[in-house]
């Protein structure tokens, strides 16, 4: 029977037990940015949304863009980790935890954005009292909360044996770890229960994750506006979400590998494997973008064409073409070339993709609103300091949340790594044996 | 920090009570979500909204929430039962509960 | 029960802006400070769209009052998460200010761009409280508002006909814009009554609706000699 050892893999426990000056520096800076953002938000609460750059007819700006963007990033985790677990990809072991943490933190941040965006946040409870399920906004509320619940549980379950290890190390917060470890002792019966639960959750979480971003796209697709009213939007958003999620995962992986010297866990092979996934998503993203714009351009419906030309050659052309370069050209260059597909190249491609995907959300939300059907008064949307400060604050909260998590729990699943060392070689070779064609009616053990 | 090393009975009992409380709170949360969704379906009926959309959505959301709550409960009691099956460490879980 | 509708004759419209001003005063629409208005936050429940048609030298300016179309199948009411905007009695699309959470989804969904958001609190700098219409509530910051077909006038008309012990009919009230129009370009009345002037005009060959192809079924019709396939 496999039993993880609490006193091995000290490198993974180091971030929890030792806190350096760099941590406090980064945390302090993030906290300062967060406080500034909070100040701006209080000002917005007092003065109304007039402090933003939004106006008639661009009634949705940074907040909705960031909402879609952050929820997109949140697909990193759960979906990647669930798919890798489901396909029994052995190299997943050091990656899944980080991915799941990204999901939980970013989902909380993204889920709050619509409330920041409300003109009357004091009335947000009207959604509970008198919500109408036919409004796509309600679909969001229900799907995002369900996804948040499912992904925190999916984060928590594989964390239990690690929490027990922390409890057994008896370093700090013993009460917290005893509370959260749920009496874990690693008996065979407990393993059976836990593995079964993880298996159910990993399957359940995939449709929930897909539904969340589909439903977010429906906010736009359900209206009659050109550039939004498109059947392709559901899968387009999901693909974009996974795409930006993998890129965000790379950035986090590379940062923590550097900071905590995890080179022995996050090896070159992990980056190689995952970067192939990123490359595939880049191609898929390009395919969807191509489909979306080709049908619009070929049909040439006047209102549709107005928004498309606004993006191709109008005021949004710089953003549009930057997006294409960042989301397609740069990943193509850096990830399809074996020489460049190293950690620095992957980092460049990932940062490009995250920025590119943010631009994509910008390009989806704003140009449609800047081009109303009727010749009403138009304006160009320029975000105010409030909106920029709140975006910075959201990123700062993400950094703080991740750092806070790293001080409480191991960012790389300790028991899964140890289990991998102990069991996966024999398990995998046994499994591969079952794949082999039994040419001479050879007896196959299972 | 003598309590952490000694694993005194009161300490373990307190932690167990906290765990039970958290599970109970989760179920209360589930019940309130169910009531909320039912309320919204009722609102949709009163307002002559698209009832199919409301019922369709509730059919997706309610199982998702119920699954999450059921899994957590299953794991919690499964782990406690599993801990008793191999009784190498007395002092942990002194026959607190029998049901699952 | 009448279904209120409006017909605007663009061949009569002189573009004087009287309807715009009447609406603004009648409905206590916020007077946005100049700086805010320059940012694109001006508020007019009824605006006059202007565009040019044809090519030089046969250019014609087209002026077209744009107000809430009171769509029968309104895109804005479908998406409201809290039932703050809905299709109410008499086929009117209503907006409940105390219930609106200010998500502005209805504004994003409205293809006619006739919903307005209170970006800032009203009456900033200019004190207009003495000139407010007592029949219409003043909206707080952070909610969406729009043309109501002067619902407060309808309320008064309802009280009047109750006192006269009869049913409300097409000609019992008109909104402020229609009352003001010096060119008699605007007609208001019961679309359900086939004999009313408004429904006869709406059925004429010159009549069209804005963005008809979207299937929103507006209750505001435009009359024009021009071939108008917007």
Image (cartoon, coloured by chain):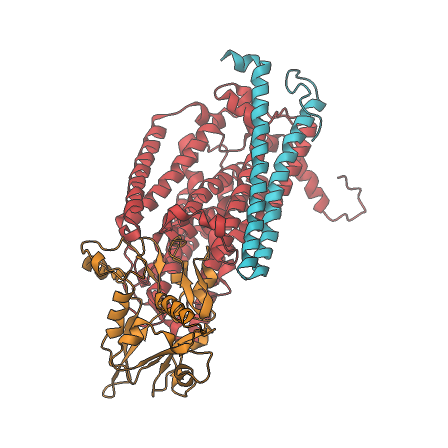
Is B66 placed left or right of A290 in the picture? right
Tell which of A221 and A280 is nearer to you: A221
Q: Quadrant of residue A332?
A: bottom left
Count of numbered marks? 0
x, y percent for residue A283: 48, 58
For the question of whether residue A237 can be seen, the reply is no
Up the image or down, A81 lies above or below C179; here it is: above
Is C91 placed left or right of A418 in the picture? left
Give me the residue at 28% from left, 44% from top.
A43
Tell which of A279 and B35 is nearer to you: B35
Q: Residue furthest front?
A: C164
x, y percent for residue A139: 51, 54
Q: Colour of chain B?
A: cyan
Tell which of A346 and A109 is nearer to you: A109
Give me the residue at 46% from left, 53% from top.
A336
Tell which of A142 and B28 is nearer to you: B28
Up the image or down, C1 lies above or below A328; here it is: below
Q: Colour of chain C?
A: orange
For the question of whether residue C196 can be seen, the reply is yes
Give me the residue at 66% from left, 38% from top.
A196
Q: Colour of chain A?
A: red
Is A394 placed left or right of B4 in the picture? left
Q: Considering the image in quadrants, where does the C terminus of chain A appear?
A: top right
Up the image or down, B3 lies above or below A271; here it is: above
x, y percent for residue B57: 57, 54
Q: Considering the image in quadrants, where does the N terminus of chain A appear?
A: top right
């Amino acid at each position: 029977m496999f039993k993880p050892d609490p006193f091995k893999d000290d490198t993974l426990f180091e971030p929890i037990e030792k806190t350096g000056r760099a941590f406090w520096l980064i945390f302090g800076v993030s906290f300062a940015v967060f406080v500034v953002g909070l100040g701006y938000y209080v000002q917005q609460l007092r003065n109304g949304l007039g402090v933003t750059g939004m106006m008639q007819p661009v009634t949705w700006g940074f907040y909705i863009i960031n909402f879609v963007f952050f929820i997109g990033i949140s697909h990193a985790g759960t979906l990647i980790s669930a798919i890798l677990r489901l396909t029994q990809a052995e190299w997943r072991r050091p990656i899944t935890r980080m991915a799941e943490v990204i999901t939980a933190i970013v989902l909380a941040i993204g889920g709050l954005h619509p409330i920041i965006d409300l003109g009357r946040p004091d009335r947000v409870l009207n959604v509970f009292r008198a919500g109408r399920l036919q409004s796509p906004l309600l679909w969001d509320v229900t799907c995002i909360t369900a996804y948040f619940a499912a992904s925190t549980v999916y984060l928590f379950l594989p964390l239990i044996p690690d929490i027990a290890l922390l409890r057994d190390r008896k370093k700090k917060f013993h009460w917290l770890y005893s509370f959260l470890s749920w009496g874990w002792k690693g008996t065979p019966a407990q393993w059976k229960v836990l593995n079964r639960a993880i298996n159910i959750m990993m399957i359940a979480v995939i449709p929930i994750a897909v539904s969340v971003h589909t439903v977010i796209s429906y906010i736009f697709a359900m209206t009659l506006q050109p550039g939004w009213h498109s059947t392709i939007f559901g899968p387009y958003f999901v693909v974009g979400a996974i795409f930006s999620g993998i890129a965000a995962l790379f950035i986090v992986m590379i940062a923590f590998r550097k900071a905590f010297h995890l080179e022995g866990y996050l090896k070159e092979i992990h980056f190689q494997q995952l970067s192939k996934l990123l490359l595939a998503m880049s191609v898929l993203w390009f395919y969807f973008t191509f489909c979306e714009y080709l049908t619009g351009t070929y049909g040439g419906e006047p209102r549709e064409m107005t928004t498309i030309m606004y993006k191709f050659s109008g005021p949004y052309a710089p953003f549009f073409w930057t997006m294409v370069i960042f989301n397609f050209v740069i990943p193509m260059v850096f990830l399809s070339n074996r020489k460049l597909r190293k950690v620095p190249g992957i980092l460049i491609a990932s940062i490009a993709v995250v920025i590119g995907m943010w631009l994509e959300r910008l390009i989806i939300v704003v140009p449609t609103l800047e081009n109303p059907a009727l010749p009403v008064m138009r304006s160009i949307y320029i975000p105010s300091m409030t909106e920029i400060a709140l975006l910075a604050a959201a990123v700062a909260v993400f950094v703080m949340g991740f750092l806070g998590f790293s001080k409480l729990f191991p960012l790389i699943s300790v028991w899964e790594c140890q289990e991998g060392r102990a069991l996966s070689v024999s398990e995998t070779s046994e499994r591969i044996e079952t794949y082999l064609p039994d040419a001479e009616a050879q007896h196959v053990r299972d | 920090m003598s309590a952490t090393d000694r694993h005194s009975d009161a300490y373990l009992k307190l932690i167990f009570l906290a765990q039970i409380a958290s599970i109970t709170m989760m179920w209360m949360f589930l019940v309130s979500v169910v009531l909320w969704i039912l309320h919204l379906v009722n609102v949709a009926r009163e307002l002559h909204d698209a009832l199919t959309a409301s019922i369709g959505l509730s059919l997706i959301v309610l199982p998702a929430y119920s699954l999450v709550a059921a899994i957590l409960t299953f794991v919690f009691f499964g782990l406690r039962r599993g801990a008793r099956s191999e009784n190498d460490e007395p002092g942990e879980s002194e026959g607190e509960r029998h049901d699952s | 029960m009448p279904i209120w509708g409006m017909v605007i004759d663009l061949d009569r419209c002189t573009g004087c802006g009287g309807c715009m001003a009447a609406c603004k005063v009648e409905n206590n629409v916020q007077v946005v400070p100049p700086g805010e208005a320059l940012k694109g936050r001006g508020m007019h429940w009824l605006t006059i769209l202007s565009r040019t048609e044809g090519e030089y030298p046969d250019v014609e300016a087209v002026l077209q009052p744009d107000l809430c179309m009171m769509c029968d199948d309104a895109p804005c009411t479908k998406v409201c998460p809290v039932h703050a905007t809905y299709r109410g009695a008499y086929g009117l699309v209503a907006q409940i200010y105390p219930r609106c959470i200010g998500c502005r989804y209805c504004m994003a969904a409205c293809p006619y761009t006739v919903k307005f958001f209170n970006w800032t609190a009203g009456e900033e700098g200019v004190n207009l409280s003495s000139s407010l219409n007592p029949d219409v509530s003043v909206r707080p910051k952070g909610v969406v508002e729009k043309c109501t077909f002067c619902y407060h006038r309808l309320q008064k008309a309802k009280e009047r006909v109750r006192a006269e012990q009869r049913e409300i009919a097409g000609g019992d009230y008109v909104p402020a814009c229609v009352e003001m129009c010096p060119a008699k370009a605007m007609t208001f009345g019961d679309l359900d009554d086939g004999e009313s002037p408004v429904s006869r005009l709406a059925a004429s060959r010159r009549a069209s609706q804005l963005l008809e192809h979207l299937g929103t079924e507006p209750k505001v019709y435009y009359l024009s000699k021009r071939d108008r396939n917007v």
